Image (cartoon, rainbow, N blue to C red):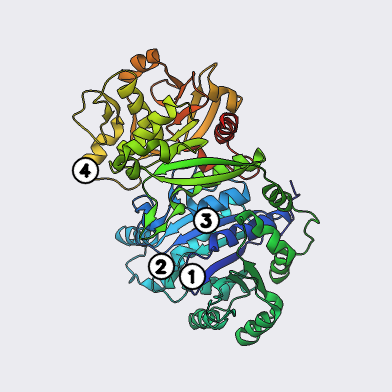
């Protein structure tokens, strides 16, 4: 661990905003800058601002918004929070995430309680002041030298204007301690074969119109920006050419820190913020990137889900943490993950083709989810994995449906189900948690699931106990339904072992089948805590089993 550099208690803030279009990797840029500054001995934290009226990300459709990431303390956040945790190697609290809805909710509640002393409450300055207050709270909570604040969306949008105003106010009051990074897309139209800077120039013009001036431009593109265009951007935007950072597409997001390091990004930022010192000569990220490039034979894993398609395109972001956890485990074992998207509805429509659909896979994984669409296809895939001895890992819904499948086809309870789908089933092997009933009756959906980190005790002699290496673990949850303890004895007698339970023994957290190469289902989401340098043991065990059976 790099020794922390003394910064005389000064709190520096780096705002990261996007230009031209969304989805170009602001989160990875933010996380990579943070990881590099961390290696230089600074204490770093990162925040995400989402410009939505939603109070949190929990009620958003995953196809529309992407994966919901759950923090240790139970906040439902944007998936970029997961990137921050993975790159920084630390757990971030709920104070590091805010939305427009959460900010307005706080201001309105304060006004109703006479918190403003009867003054007229206005969008400016009161909303930006609340935003700044939340940034200060995150800085203090982590005692951070550097706080990276990613503002969602793209400059020029109406939704994020008040967040940009907060950045302007902080830049005005603390010009030497506040930095602005613009991540902008540089298109290379196929018909021209030339990288164009004009869209980014217009994006900077929009930033200027709200009183902000970028200190650094990250030029995202399919290719690395050349010196000619760096000079052109610098000349037209009031920057030095060396303040334009090339960020071409790379094979893995974990190559980005090395890419930035080669361009002296951490030193440039430290110089602009008046932080003295040197960064280490070698970076752990360079070694990690080499490990990825040297990864050997492929392991083919099918993710069976339903949140894949958006029009004619596949939306992998829905299961981002699962994908990254599989990568971490695979690279740790020196192999290359080959992930295949399996639409569970295709299995439902073509049940006789299941061997064609799943037969070439080395392992099957069913992630979390909600609702009845595609559910029978998932159950069919679980049965295939159980009977054909294909390694299986079920996460949350994947664990619940594994229990349903086992009850139906091993115990013969053909109507066994979860009450989420069939409230009248005679064998509700999965049912609603007691504290959730009143919430659903009153339509109280936002932030009311079992959320955040909870303890789990692992059964002596179980596979999961062997993989974890100890008896007691802490894992993150996001669910309303659970394993029905009334059926535990019958299921265990038939061979479905309850390998992990809550400390009081009332909640089943993990199920597994012993006479199988690897068949594990977890009520929690282990993917949330997997890190590049510390892959999750369950994912490592799963991928290792896939290789063995392969």
* Upstream in sequence: badge 3 or badge 1: 3
Q: Which mark is residue 137?
A: 3
Tell which tag, 3 or 1, sits nearer the viewer: 1
Labels 1 and 2 touching (C-beta < 8 A): yes
Q: Nearer the viewer, residue 203 or 274?
A: 203
Asked if residue 496 is positioned above or below residue 105 in the image, the reply reads above
Secondary structure beneath dot 3 equals: helix
Write down the residue under mark 4. Answer: 442
Q: How many marks?
A: 4
Write down the residue under mark 1. Answer: 166
Write down the residue under mark 2. Answer: 127
Query: What is the quadrant of residue 115 in the picture?
Result: bottom left
Residue found at the far top of this picture: 493
* Upstream in sequence: badge 2 or badge 3: 2
Q: Residues within 10 Å of mark 3 (few under 14, many from 20)?
A: some
Residue found at the far left of this picture: 424
Residue 380 position, x and y percent, is 35, 33
Secondary structure beneath dot 4 equals: loop
Residue found at the far bottom of this picture: 236
């Amino acid at each position: 661990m790099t020794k922390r550099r003394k910064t005389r208690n000064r709190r520096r803030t780096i705002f990261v905003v996007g230009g031209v279009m969304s989805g170009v990797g602001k989160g990875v840029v933010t996380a990579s800058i943070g990881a590099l500054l961390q290696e230089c001995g600074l204490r770093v934290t990162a925040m995400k601002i989402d410009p939505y009226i939603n109070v949190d990300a929990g009620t958003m459709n995953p196809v529309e918004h992407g994966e919901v990431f759950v923090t240790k303390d139970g906040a439902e956040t944007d998936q970029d929070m997961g990137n921050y945790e993975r790159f920084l190697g630390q757990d971030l609290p709920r104070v590091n995430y805010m939305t427009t809805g959460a900010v307005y909710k706080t201001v309105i509640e304060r006004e109703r309680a006479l918190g403003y002393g009867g003054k007229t409450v206005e969008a400016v300055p009161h909303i930006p002041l609340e935003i700044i207050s939340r940034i200060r709270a995150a800085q203090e909570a982590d005692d951070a030298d550097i706080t990276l604040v990613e503002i969602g969306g793209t400059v020029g949008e109406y939704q994020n204007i008040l967040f940009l105003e907060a950045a302007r106010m902080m830049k005005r009051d603390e010009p030497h301690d506040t930095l602005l990074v613009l991540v902008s897309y540089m298109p290379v139209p196929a018909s021209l074969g030339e990288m164009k800077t004009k869209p980014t120039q217009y994006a900077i013009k929009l930033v200027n119109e709200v009183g902000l001036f970028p200190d650094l431009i990250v030029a995202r593109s399919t290719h690395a920006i050349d010196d000619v265009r760096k000079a052109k951007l610098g000349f037209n935007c009031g920057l030095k050419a060396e303040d334009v950072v090339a960020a071409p597409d790379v094979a893995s997001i974990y190559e980005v820190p090395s890419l930035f390091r080669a361009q002296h990004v951490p030193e440039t930022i430290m110089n602009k913020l008046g932080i003295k010192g040197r960064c280490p000569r070698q970076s752990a990220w360079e070694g990690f990137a080499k490990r990825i490039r040297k990864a050997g034979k492929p392991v083919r894993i099918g993710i069976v889900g339903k949140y894949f398609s958006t029009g004619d395109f596949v939306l992998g972001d829905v299961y981002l943490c699962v994908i990254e956890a599989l990568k971490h485990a695979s690279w740790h074992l020196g192999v290359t993950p080959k992930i295949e998207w399996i639409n569970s509805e295709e299995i439902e429509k073509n049940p006789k083709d299941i061997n064609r659909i799943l037969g070439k896979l080395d392992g099957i994984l069913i992630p979390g989810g909600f609702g009845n669409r595609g559910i029978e296809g998932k159950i069919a895939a679980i049965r295939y994995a159980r009977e054909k001895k294909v390694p299986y890992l079920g996460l949350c819904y994947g664990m619940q449906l594994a229990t349903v499948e086992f009850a139906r086809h091993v115990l013969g309870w053909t109507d066994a189900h979860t009450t989420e789908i069939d409230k009248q089933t005679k064998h509700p092997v999965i049912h609603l948690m007691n504290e959730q009933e009143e919430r659903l009756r009153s339509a109280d959906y936002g932030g009311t699931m079992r959320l955040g980190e909870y303890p789990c005790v692992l059964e002596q002699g179980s596979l999961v106990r062997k993989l974890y290496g100890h008896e007691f673990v802490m894992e993150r949850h996001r669910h309303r339904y659970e394993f029905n303890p009334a059926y535990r004895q019958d299921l265990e007698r038939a061979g479905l072992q309850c390998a992990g339970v809550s400390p009081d023994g009332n909640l089943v957290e993990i199920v597994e089948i012993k006479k199988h190469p690897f068949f594990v289902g977890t009520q929690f989401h282990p993917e949330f805590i997997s890190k590049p340098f510390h892959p999750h043991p369950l994912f490592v065990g799963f991928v290792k089993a896939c290789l063995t059976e392969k």
